[in-house]
Image (cartoon, rainbow, N blue to C red):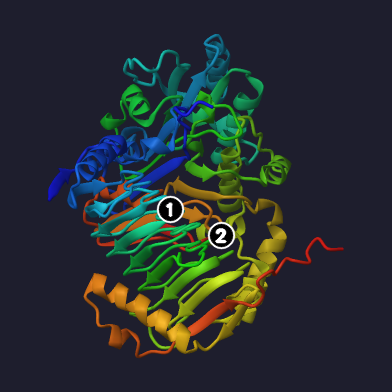
Amino acid sequence: MTEINAKGLRFKELNEKIRAAVAKGEKEITVKGVNGQYYIGDGLRGTATIALDGVPGNDLAAFMDGPTIVISGNAQDNIGNTMNSGRVVVKGSAGDVLGYGMRGGRIHVLGDVGYRVGIHMKGLKKQSPTIVVGGKAGDFFGEYMAGGVLILLGLNEKDGATLAGDYLGTGMHGGAIYIRGAVDKGFCGAEVGITEPDAEDLATIKEAVGEFCKDFGLKPEEVMKKPFKKLYPASLRPYGNLYAY
Amino acid sequence: MNHNYQKDISGCGLTGLINKKRRRVSGSEIVKSLCLMNDRGNGLGAGYAAYGIYPDMADFYAFHVMYDDPGMRHEVEDHLRGNYHVEKTEEIPTAPVKAIHISPLLMRYFVRPLKERLAGGIGSDDYVVNTVMRINSESGGAFVFSSGKNMGTFKGVGNPADIARFFRIEEYEGYIWTAHTRFPTNTPGWWGGAHPFALLDWSIVHNGEISSYGINKRYLEMYGYKLTLLTDTEAAAYMLDLLIRRHGITVKTACQALAAPFWKRIDAMPEAEKEALTALRQTYGSALLNGPFSILFGHAKGLVGINDRIKLRPLVAATHGAFTYMASEESAIREICPKPDKVWSPRAGEPVIAELE
């Protein structure tokens, strides 16, 4: 176990310390006094768990490939850009553009997330990125989604509350979005179909919710009591004919 | 290929605070908050605006003037003396800073238009606006970059810490502060182009770019504004003056003109609201700010933060007791307010309006 004090450190110094600890083979790293330092865990490989106390800066876990990052409070923008594997756990809320172009691994946010979450997410064969959000999401949730799984839980919302913003799944052509609550068709992109999840979907949700609940000490059976809607791409090539004439 | 190439990744950063009970705080607070976001700018511009800093001179317009050409000073001062009662003339206090090699001559005047100049029924605010437009567009080297009462802006080319030391920001105390670190995108990084942009009591800091600048500029020119500072944000400052002071619409309504809801949202509103917003969009089509922005604007009665309609730039708000904070990043708020009562990300196009009691 290594403890790093981030107070007053610039992002470069802090990231050098974290990288040095990982390079030494340290598996448990705790960072105290984080506030605003960018690029934490970017491109990092291995299996270390990095616990951050505070509000880390933008572009955390970009291109990350393996480690687990646990954030005690809120997180800012652009987390998990093109992340390949590993896990990011946010105990507060997170900002805009979470999981942009994400290719694998898991991001769990207990609170709300901002705009443009899970856009351009992609998956292939065993690679299936998963984002589970305990609260609500802003506009453009899952825009241009090409693969993977997005789950919105709305844990503290009343029945019938709308959990996502406008332009939900616009341009979606792969993957699945599961929403534990109401979906307003008027807020969805034209490419999105809405349906009830089937047995296979429910297995996917159950597995993802189980992992999410482990991180926050919640009971998965409670979460699963409310029904989900599934959003799926109505066409795999929605723009196939766009330039055909 | 050079693999050591380090891309300069930047975007503007902004931060602001208000104490609703008018308790004044030292500029060192806002400097601390802004400096946390140092990496958002690239050293080509930083600035601060503060309200409540000249309580002994609160009846006078405080003109902050930069002279690119010190020779312009006599001409501008002759003009001021001929049209204003000049209560006090002084250099803006500065401190030597190693990183700031050159700076324009920076002067401060506390003035009030002469009574006989207001004889035609023109209000003193309008008179001041005309003076600012005239000096900025005609003098060719002098720029009035602050012209409000009991407030002032301080800005230049440099990074946030250096500009703060240069203007001795920590020596001022204000109940509203805004601050900005700049990454100029399409326009030159020069002293007059740093934020905040100010006219009368309006001061504005902006992250983003206003792609409707041409339309906004032509619209403002019809009302006598002259856009001389070579950057888009200037248009937003004058637009607030036009809409709120001259046309008398509320801050909230002005925000709905600058970041109007999409027609599809308006069509879904209850009839009365739909009618009002339709009329507003039709009347102020040329005031709509298009493109990505987050903006903070200070005025004599408060502080407002607003985003573009699809949230293409960040904005976080927080409250703690009588304080409201707004910034590009939550960490910039926590740097000076570690345990806020409430933190939230305002929705796109929905203003955060904090007013003095």
Measured as percent of width and height from the top left, residue B144 is found at 53, 27
Q: Residues within 10 Å of mark 1 (few under 14, many from 20)?
A: many
Residue at horizontal 51 percent and vertical 82 percent from the top = A230
Q: Is residue A142 visible?
A: no
Vertical placement of residue A195 versus B44, above or below: below
In the displayed structure, would residue B93 be above or below residue B207?
A: above
Depth check, front residue: A97 or A132: A132
Which chain is indicated by disc 1? A
| Quadrant where the N terminus of chain B is found in the figure | top right
Are discs 1 and 2 less than 8 Å apart at CB?
Answer: no
Quarter of the picture holding the C terminus of chain B: bottom left
In this rendering, the label closer to the viewer, 1 or 2: 1
Disc on res. B128 = none
Examine the image and state in which quarter residue B343 appears.
bottom left
Q: Position of residue B38 (x, y in %)?
A: 37, 35
Crowding at dot 2, Cα within 10 Å, few <14 / some 14-19 / many 20+, comes out as: many
Q: Secondary structure at mark 2?
A: loop
Give residue B310's mark. 2
Question: Which residue is found at the position 60% from the left and 55% from the top?
Answer: B258
Q: Position of residue B288 (x, y in %)?
A: 65, 54
Residue A78, label in figure = 1
User: Which chain does the residue under circle 2 lie in?
Assistant: B
State how far apart marks 1 and 2 are (Cα): 16 Å
Q: Nearer the viewer, residue A226 or B84?
A: A226
Q: Amino acid at mark 2?
A: Ile
Helix, strand or loop at disc 1? loop
- Amino acid type at mark 1: Asn
